[in-house]
Amino acid sequence: MMSEEELSYIVVRGIRVGIISLKTVLEELSTWKGRKDEEIANLMLVKLRARNYIPSSVEAEYKAAFLREFKKFVGEPVPEEKTSILNIAILGPGCPSCDQLEQMVMSILTEENIGAEVEHIRDVREIASYGMVATPALVINGKIKSYGRLPSKTQIKDWIKEKTYER
């Protein structure tokens, strides 16, 4: 059985896709910073295809997504990922405030009957990749909305509705 740590998510053609061993490959290739983008993307495709099904018809889109993840991992700026689904991330190691933020978000989504992918990111390295040092943090569709404090339920609801109508 696969551990939760082995599965990461990327956006390909606006759809969130699970990838096995992405973190491992990113760590292996972290010394490749400065090499040509095409070289990095090709090697990531080869390494990740060994554990994941990647249709040849969307190979270029996967390579672009892998390269985007590599650049985020090594701290390079990357364009915002476009997704057709409302994506909400709670960043925090699992402290009471982080858990409360997650509960508030889930409650709002239920009350408002809004579909969204919600992920509670607890891994310190992944949290740091967002540039965060203070938690809890709330990220909606890649935009940091709040960090270092617990926003009000009304504010969270406004942010979620704003992003729901933006899509």
Image (cartoon, rainbow, N blue to C red):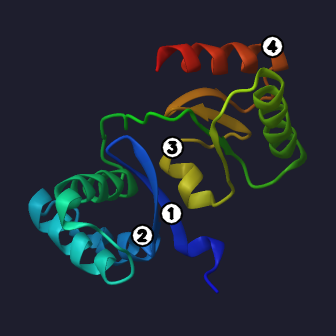
Evaluate if marks 1 and 4 touch, with contact meaning CB atoms under 8 Å apart.
no
**Three-letter code, disc 1:** Ser
Residue 50 in picture, x, y percent from top left: 32, 84
Is disc 2 placed on a helix, strand or loop?
helix
Picture quarter containing residue 52?
Answer: bottom left
* Residue at the (29%, 77%) spot, across then down: 49
Sequence-first tag of 4 and 2: 2
Mark 4 → mark 2, Cα distance in angstroms: 36 Å
* Residue at the (42%, 45%) spot, across then down: 15
Sequence-first tag of 1 and 4: 1
Q: Give the total of numbered labels.
A: 4
Q: Is residue 43 above or below residue 98?
A: below
Mark 3 residue crowding within 10 angstroms, few (<14) / some (14–19) / many (20+): some
Residue receiving disc 2? 22
Q: Which mark is residue 154?
A: 4
Mark 3 → mark 1, Cα distance in angstroms: 15 Å
Mark 2 residue crowding within 10 angstroms, few (<14) / some (14–19) / many (20+): many
Residue 149 in picture, x, y percent from top left: 78, 29
Residue 76 in picture, x, y percent from top left: 30, 47
Is disc 1 placed on a helix, strand or loop?
strand
Is disc 3 placed on a helix, strand or loop?
loop
**Three-letter code, disc 2:** Leu
Residue receiving disc 1? 8
* Residue at the (51%, 42%) spot, across then down: 131
**Three-letter code, disc 4:** Thr
Compare residues 150 and 2 and report the one nearer the observer.
2
Determine whether, in the image, residue 67 is placed left or right of residue 91.
left
Mark 3 → mark 2, Cα distance in angstroms: 17 Å
